[in-house]
Amino acid sequence: MDTNTITQQLPTTIRDFNAAHEARDADAALALVTEDAVVADVGEAFVGEAALRRFVAEAGAEFTYTDEVTGVRRDGEVWVVGHHLEGDFPGGVADLDYRFALEGDRIARLDIVLG
């Protein structure tokens, strides 16, 4: 199953955020999060506009990698998007879960954890 088919079940907000994050478009990504949104990326927390802007623009930018969406599921009210990464980062391979909590039609929290 291709990525587009897998992600069609996601709310539009999450699909749009993922596209903005992949494009490193901080303005588009920030338009999709709540004012007090929190992003936790494998233990490092980003809170506030400047930190979230830095996360979108810079997280992982020093590496070259592929990112394949491997699945989508619900965990209660949280949307979980599985990602398989391969590249020149330490370890070379990572399976991550992006756990999105929505507040209305905006992202209130994103936890990126080892899958």
Image (tube, rainbow, N blue to C red):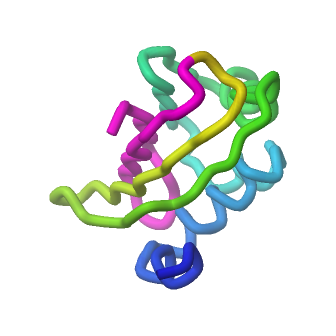
User: Where residue 70 sits in the image (x, y, percent)?
Assistant: 44, 61
> For this view, does 40 lie left or right of residue 74?
right
The residue drawn where x is 53% and y is 33% is 93
Q: Position of residue 20 (x, y in %)?
A: 74, 55
Question: Would you say 109 lies left or right of 59 here?
Answer: left
Residue 86 visible in the snapshot: yes
Q: Nearer the viewer, residue 62 or 107?
A: 62
In the displayed structure, would residue 21 be above or below residue 53? below
Q: In the image, residue 5 lies at what x, y percent?
A: 51, 84
- Magenta segment, prevailing SS (helix, strand or loop): strand
Residue depicted at x 48% and y 50%: 83
Q: How many marks?
A: 0
The quadrant where residue 79 appears? bottom left
Q: Nearer the viewer, residue 10 or 63?
A: 63
- Magenta segment boundaries in residue numbering: 91-115
The answer to whether 19 is drawn above or below residue 110 in the figure is: below
Q: Is residue 72 above or below residue 25?
A: below
Measured from the top left, where is residue 14 in percent x and y? 53, 63
Q: Classify residue 41 as left or right of residue 29.
A: left
Q: What residue is rendered at 50% in x and 26% in y?
A: 41
In the image, farthest residue toward the left:
76
Residue at point 62%, 50% (across, down): 67
Residue 72 lies in the magenta stretch: no
Residue 20 vs residue 68, the one in the foreground: 68
